[in-house]
Image (tube, rainbow, N blue to C red):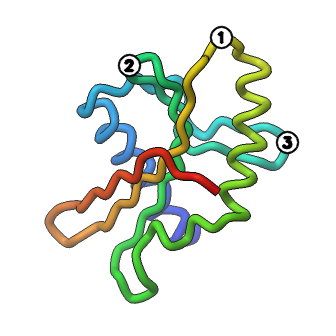
Amino acid sequence: MAHHNSVGKLGEQLAKKYMVSNGFKILHQNWRYQHWEIDIIASKDEVLHFVEVKTRKSLQFGYPESDVTRKKLRYIIKAAEEYQFQNPGWTRIQFDVLSIILHSEDEEYFFIEDVYV
């Protein structure tokens, strides 16, 4: 497995723990539709959250959240539309980004809520 893949997998595990500890219920992880994927689908306070997780070990190439482009958000929205078609009943949805920086002894989290294209 490539190094960036192992960092990404670790980030998704940490993201799940972070979200659960902040009151979210994880519904799905790595939910796929065709070639699109949503890292985490969760709920909290009757809101459905589609969460993109970005993780880095350093800031050499900028903050992790800077990798969430308009194109990436459009893909997440397309996948979310299909998810809602398959799972109707949600009246409130939200797109979020969870940025994680892995330091040698701990992690730094930055949760960006209600992201728009």
- Helix, strand or loop status at disc 1: loop
Amino acid type, label 3: Gln
Q: Nearer the viewer, mark 2 or mark 3?
A: 2
Image disc number at residue 89: 1
Name the residue at 76% across, 33% down: 81
Q: Residues within 10 Å of mark 2 (few under 14, many from 20)?
A: few
The Cα–Cα distance between marks 1 and 2, rounded to whole angstroms, is 14 Å
Name the residue at 70% across, 16% down: 87
Seen as rendered, the residue at the extreme right is 34
Give left or right: position of 92 versus 25: right
Q: Label 2, on which residue?
A: 45
Give left or right: position of 105 versus 53: left
Give left or right: position of 8 versus 63: right
Which image quadrant for residue 30?
A: top right
- Residue 8 x, y percent position in the rendering: 49, 60
Q: Is residue 82 above or below residue 51?
A: above
Mark 1 or 2 closer to N-term? 2
Q: Is residue 12 above or below residue 66?
A: above
Seen as rendered, the residue at the extreme top is 89
Which image quadrant for residue 83?
A: top right
- Residue 24 x, y percent position in the rendering: 36, 27
Mark 3 or 1 closer to N-term? 3
The quadrant the C terminus occupies is bottom right
Q: Is residue 68 above or below residue 11?
A: below
Image disc number at residue 16: none
Which image quadrant for residue 100?
A: bottom left
Name the residue at 73% across, 64% down: 71
- Residue 1 x, y percent position in the rendering: 58, 65
Amino acid type, label 2: Asp
The Cα–Cα distance between marks 2 and 3, rounded to whole angstroms, is 29 Å
Q: Label 3, on which residue?
A: 34
- Residue 41 x, y percent position in the rendering: 54, 32
